[in-house]
Image (spheres, rainbow, N blue to C red):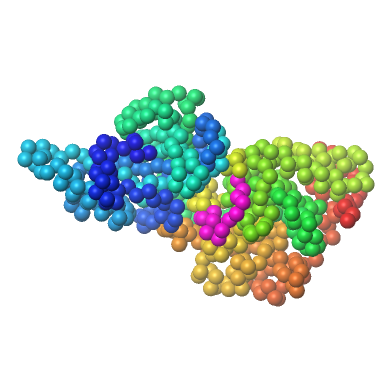
Amino acid sequence: MGAVNSNQSSQRQSSQAKSGKKQGKPAHHLRKRTMFPVSPNPVDEASTIILQLMYASNVPKCRDMLSVEGYIERKFDSCKARDTKHLPVLFHNESKMLIASIIDDLEDDEQRQGGNDKKKGNAVALQTIDSYLFRTNKRHPSPDPVWNFTIDLQLTPVKGDVLHLAITRGSGSDARKIVAMGAFNVSELPRDEVITKTLCPISRKVKTTKGLLELGAGLNMSKCCTLSFKVLKTLNQRCRVYFIRHGESTWNEARRDGNYRKLIHFDHILTPKGIKESLALNSTWTNSAEKEEIDSTLQRFLAAETILSSPLTRALQTCLLSLQGHPTFSEKGIKLCRDLREVKSLGGFDAKGKYYGTKIMHRTEQKLKKKVKEMTAGADAADIKQHIHMIENICRKTTIDYNDANSQWWVLKETKADVERRVEDFVSFLRYSPESTFICVGHSMFLKALFSICLCPKWCTLNPEFSSNLKTEKISNAGCVALDFSFKGSLKNWKIDNVELIFDSTFQVRHKGRRSHSESRKKGSSVKALRAHPTSERDTDRLDSFTRAHSASPTTLSRLESPKR
């Protein structure tokens, strides 16, 4: 990417390299705390350049991991810049390291020129300086990779700023090669709109920013690689998230029964009990809506603008069954989000997927129909067929946005630091999304990690027992918890300041080596004081009532049995 710098910048960097000095543009990735805005000025609008790098199309075929890298190129009067009073204006919130490098560059230029410009009375030419290099997360090879990576460059936009972006490939942490690149005038980019730009192939060998700007404007978008991104202006200050844990899976069943042989499988599915739990959650909120018993919590739940789901089969199955009939489910469908996947523990198989893209939904439908057939074994053939038809309607008529699950979305190992970064990415997605109310279907370990990192200390002090349970205990299968996020300043202040278990959800507590469901309807109630919560007798009627609600003709199925073991 250094090839597209101006000639003066290239000469300056080469002279520094020969003299042994540190170059003026350090390769800092901005993947730590600096990826979040730190400016105290914005209230509901961004005052700095905030980029949301979304997805690319027509990426040349390769075998290496793909990333997007970029930086801001800025020109300024070197005479004014020599006075350090002007530097904070030119580089809003930039680090002392970059400011020091600018001053070093100016001194090098003055020594190299030897005062010739002053003797001749010529004006000093404009200098060029680049911001820190930023880089997205890596994605597996794909012609249409999706990043959904948002970064605050902490630079106030100035007239003449040029945004440089490049798609790079590489297997190692530092080894990377440019696939395609482009340059764009920041002042010409609209705010809060998806921008799709054509990138120049590396074979064109463009060496100047001006040449890159001119060439990019004349390329055919249908034949070249394109990159879609946003320059954000409007920011969320608060958001509400309804987090649903998946129903009981074959992993949960195997651990409960001590059948460890069944644990050695990837991408576990829902058990018959997990299907009933998902249907029970659907009945809970739909019955209240039908009876017009709509409180503020249910009203906001029904008004949720986006439904997100983990790509793992058990989560997507739960999403399809528990949210059928929701207004957003019917209008927009489901968006898959790789950040919602389960935490990959050492030796754990339940966090690894099998498929990506459209094959995710195909497997979800096939496994769900197979379990429904087992649950209705012994019933009339017509009734079984109607149940299967109901499942097919739900799966095939629901719109699925595969989003960043269109390539391999699971990992083979995950450290604690990796989980923390994934939580940061998820919270960043919420912060910079145009929507402010979400329903997310995911997993218990990820939810506990989210609480451990983001719970507000002040709220934890007021609710010590409840907050402790949220960080250490699992909510029951197909349980739902409402979270309120507050976004102020940097990540340290992006906190969950209110949590509530809703729809009769409970904690799942360990008692003497076994798991049992327990009630936790009161905020702050102690886990030790929770009484056992028996399985509802109406569970066996859930599938029948659900089919009657979503089929054109009523079913006559009289009983529902789980498969014999």
Where on the picture, by quarter, is residue 370?
Answer: top right
Q: Is residue 140 left or right of residue 261?
A: left
Magenta stretch contains residue 417? yes
The outermost residue toward the bottom is 529
Q: Is residue 393 left or right of residue 112?
A: right
The residue at 18%/44% (across/down) is 109
Is any part of residue 174 visible from this angle?
yes
The residue at 48%/36% (across/down) is 228
Magenta stretch contains residue 512? no
Is any part of residue 434 visible from this angle?
no
Q: Position of residue 455 (x, y in %)?
A: 54, 64
Number of disc labels: 0
Which corner quadrant holds the C terminus?
A: bottom right
Instruction: Work out whether residue 59 or residue 85 is closer to the camera in this orientation and state it.
Output: 59
Q: Position of residue 381 (x, y in %)?
A: 91, 40
Q: Position of residue 412 (x, y in %)?
A: 61, 51
Q: What range is drawn magenta here?
A: 409-424
Q: Position of residue 558 (x, y in %)?
A: 91, 49
The residue at 41%/55% (across/down) is 34
Which corner quadrant holds the N terminus?
A: top left
Instruction: Work out whether residue 300 or residue 434 is closer to the camera in this orientation and state it.
Output: 434
Instruction: Work out whether residue 65 or residue 48 is closer to the camera in this orientation and state it.
Output: 65
Q: Is residue 353 left or right of residue 460?
A: right
The residue at 47%/54% (across/down) is 237
Instruction: Work out whether residue 116 or residue 423 is closer to the camera in this orientation and state it.
Output: 116
In this rendering, is residue 208 above or below 130?
above
